Image (cartoon, rainbow, N blue to C red):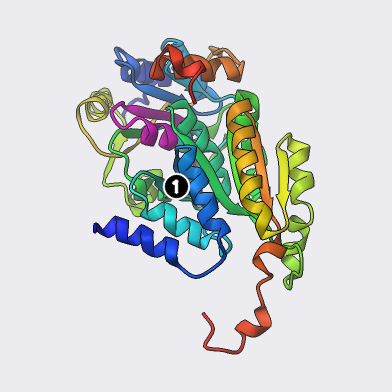
Amino acid sequence: MSKLLHRRQVVRTLLKDRNGMMVVGGLGASAWDITDAGDEPTSFPMWGAMGGATMVGLGMALAQPKRKALVITGDGEMLMSLGSLATIAIQKPANLSIVVLDNEHYGETGMQETHTRYGVDLVTIAQGAGFQRTLRVNTEEDVAKLRHMIYNEEGTLFAVVKIDPEKLPLVLPPRDGSYIKNRFRMAVLGPDALHDE
Amino acid sequence: MSETKKGLNEAAAAPGPEWPKGIYDLLKAHRIRQVAFVPDAGHSRLIRMCEADPEMVAVRLTTEEEGIAQLGGAWLGGDKGVMLMQSSGVGNCINMLALPISCTFPLLMIVTMRGDHGEFNPAQVPMGSNTQAVLEAMGVIVKRADSAEDVVDTVAGGLALAFNTYRPVAVLIGQKVMGAKDFRKLTKVGAQ
């Protein structure tokens, strides 16, 4: 049994020198994780709308096919939107990666076990939905491989990273949604984004 | 003629009322690119036209709240989008509406009504009769068209309101416009 990975280290590795990649952080710990790695304009941390992270990722990936899009979310958030894997699998945006940080618990709400604790296998579900590229991440070497697949390969990707269910201090992003939206659009679309449709 | 162009012309030429074509023309005029939809009889012709349009990305959803999140992401990336759905799916969207409301995303939901004028199915009525109240309770602006003549203009107003003022708007197309589904009739013929 290998030692479990630590979420903040994994996310820092994935987001280092991200080169304008668009990043969605799912509600809860994943939003704090992407903020811990650096509060960038091309980050979209979610303060609510649980179950929406993967589809926000799909919408931005379809809108910006030449730019990488990465969704980082938790097992609880992913379990709430399993249907979105079917929706995304048939769109197949080549620039979209989904990474689930799986601690097998609802860490923000009292550490109740999630379904993955009882054997629900998100990778198999994604494969069944039609994801051709999937990865199980358990070691540092796997994390390096995941980074390579995200940055240097094409094709919709789904990965599950098994992580330590540790409790960490929150690293809060700005919580004014209008600000987060506008700085994102200006970073991706240029300064005219606030004036154009 | 290309296959896609042919498909678009066929979808546009399908028999039926004019308003779906009118909505499609509006979507083109407003440069709507992402069209999220849950299959729906009232929108079937419009869905086919959007699917056949190579300039649009038609995204079939498994449930309506996916579309709320998708269109938020679309706006972040610079695409304009709309959602085609029926009123029974409005209830699925409620918590996800926190996203466009808290981030001031433009959003247009074009909703065909069930559980409305002349409904046969009792299970459609609880959501259908409360669709407008539920949307308004969440802060979505609701406009309604109950005649075929009003549909296109109401959608035009909804598009302008949503994208000019950065807020979620729903246009409800009343069941009087489509006609209620006749279940009794469907028990007879070699019904599909």
**Residue B15, how many percent across, how many down?**
49, 70
> Can you see residue B187?
yes
Tell which of B57 and A136 is nearer to you.
B57
Q: Residue at x 53, y 37 (%)?
A: B69
**Regarding mark 1 in the picture, which secondary structure is present there?**
loop
Is residue A190 shown above or below B107? above
The amino acid sitting under disc 1 is Gly
**Residue B78, how many percent across, how many down?**
43, 27
Is residue A112 shown above or below B174? above
> Can you see residue A166?
no
Judged left or right of residue A189, residue B21 is right
Mark 1 Cα shell of 10 Å, populated few (<14), some (14-19), many (≥20): few
Q: Per the image, is A30 magenta?
A: no
Judged left or right of residue A162, residue A155 is left
Q: Residue at x 34, y 21 (%)?
A: A21
**Residue B106, how many percent across, how many down?**
58, 31
Q: In the rendered structure, the residue with mark 1 lies on which chain?
A: A
**Residue B25, how many percent across, how many down?**
49, 48
The magenta segment is A57-78
Q: On the rendered image, what quadrant is the N terminus of chain B found in?
A: bottom left
Judged left or right of residue B149, residue B73 is left
Toward which corner of the image does residue B109 lie, by quadrant? top right
Judged left or right of residue B75, residue B90 is right
Tell which of A62 and A19 is nearer to you.
A62
Q: Residue at x 72, y 64 (%)?
A: B176
Tell how many labels. Answer: 1
Tell which residue pokes out farthest to the front in this image.
Answer: B149
Q: Which residue bears the numbered disc 1?
A: A119
Is residue B188 shown above or below B107? below
